[in-house]
Image: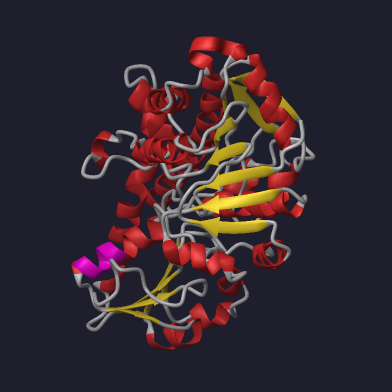
Amino acid sequence: MSFKKVSVIGLGYIGLPTAAVIASRGIEVLGVDINLDTVETINAGDIHIVEPDLDIIVRGVVTTGKLRATTSPEAADVFMVAVPTPFIEGERDCHQPDLSYIESAANAIAGVLEKGNLVILESTSPVGATEKLAHWLAAARPDLTFPQDKGDMADIKVAHCPERVLPGYVLQELVSNDRVIGGMSSACSELAVSLYQTFVRGECIITNARTAEMAKLTENSFRDVNIAFANELSMICDKLKINVWELIKLANRHPRVNILNPGPGVGGHCIAVDPWFIVNSCPDEAKIIKQARLTNDAKPYYVIEQVTKAADEFKRPVIACLGLTFKADIDDLRESPALQIVRALTENQLGELLAVEPNINCLPGNLAGQGVELTSLTSALEKANVVVILVDHKEFKAADASQFATKVVIDTRGLI
């Protein structure tokens, strides 16, 4: 099937690159976002997120008229939903998934749905979310049929196709990675495959919607468990006075061992969130997955304790925190353990606090006006007597190691 117009609902870290890549294949793409500033920025040919080469592609497809952004959905052949799935506000300890963004997207597009349309949920979601999306659409459009009732013969096809990309490499991996296609019927899967084959060079692998949802959660839970092992090792090694970085390097010389690197915790919207979706669904069975989450969520507090001890060595401590984002060389602060640590240090009022984050121009709202100074790496290293390396940005890797020689350094990334 040929697709004349695709609508992408949600123009964030996944939605915008996806919209741009599809538009670069000559298909008309309408991007929909509730944020007017985001819409205006994109229509001006600019971008509101940091992702290598994305600005070039967006500028090109906007200039040629293949990509346009709006706050209101319009008729299209395909609707790709790429909205957030956070926890319900105020219930973080319960880790209850918040599907209200998906429900809002369903209500927004329902009015413009037409027979033969394909609706794809790309948002990382708990198992069963795609079925809920289909039910919300059916409730809003009783004049149309959906796969939960009519299977292959439904007017509207619905599928779940989770993204599997790494920030900083999104454009390459959107094209090169295999895609799991989970339709609510065989016809749904086949139609979704035909769309993804317009821009994906990897293999499109068909399964059902629930398995596709679980596949994405499983991938990130696997990584979370492995990171938890490394983080636990780092705390054990601190107590036993062993260099954890040397230990991991030696252990990884075993042909069947591949231990990941420890860090100050785990961040980002995926690994720090997705395992809880499994735990929430099956709390009695997901014991290892839950413990890995608890281990990784506890690591920032361990780092804070180390910084507190280091600050106590000085009459006037000046603490430089290197990095605020959840991973290197991006501007994404979502679920960032580095940001959590800096926020806690601010609240503890240990001393003068400097933040170095080369990928942002101003402090986030929860740090602005809280006594934290956003400064350059050079200035921070001149002033600080305690340095906390929280993110391994390229700028920090390139720094002269001698600049750290007279500092008390807490290196959560193994840079020096």
Quadrant in which residue 364 is drawn: bottom left
Residue at (52% x, 82% y) in the render: 403
Side of 318 relative to 18 (left or right): left
Is residue 344 one of those drawn in magenta?
Answer: yes
Residue 211 locus on image (x, y percent): 55, 20
Which of the pair 385/268 is nearer the observer?
268
Side of 294 relative to 225 (left or right): left
- Tell me the chief SS of the magenta region: helix
Quadrant in which residue 165 is drawn: top right
Residue 415 locus on image (x, y percent): 56, 65
- Magenta segment, which residues? 343-347
Quadrant in which residue 57 is drawn: bottom right
Residue at (43% x, 23% y) in the render: 138
Residue 74 locus on image (x, y percent): 53, 46
Which of the pair 359/146 is nearer the observer?
146
Figure check: 290 above or below 211? below
Is residue 333 one of those drawn in magenta?
Answer: no
Q: How is the image coloured?
A: secondary structure
Decide if residue 390 is in sight here.
no
Residue 125 locus on image (x, y percent): 45, 33
Residue at (24% x, 38% y) in the render: 93
Figure check: 201 above or below 386? above
Residue at (20% x, 72% y) in the render: 349
Figure check: 292 above or below 266? above
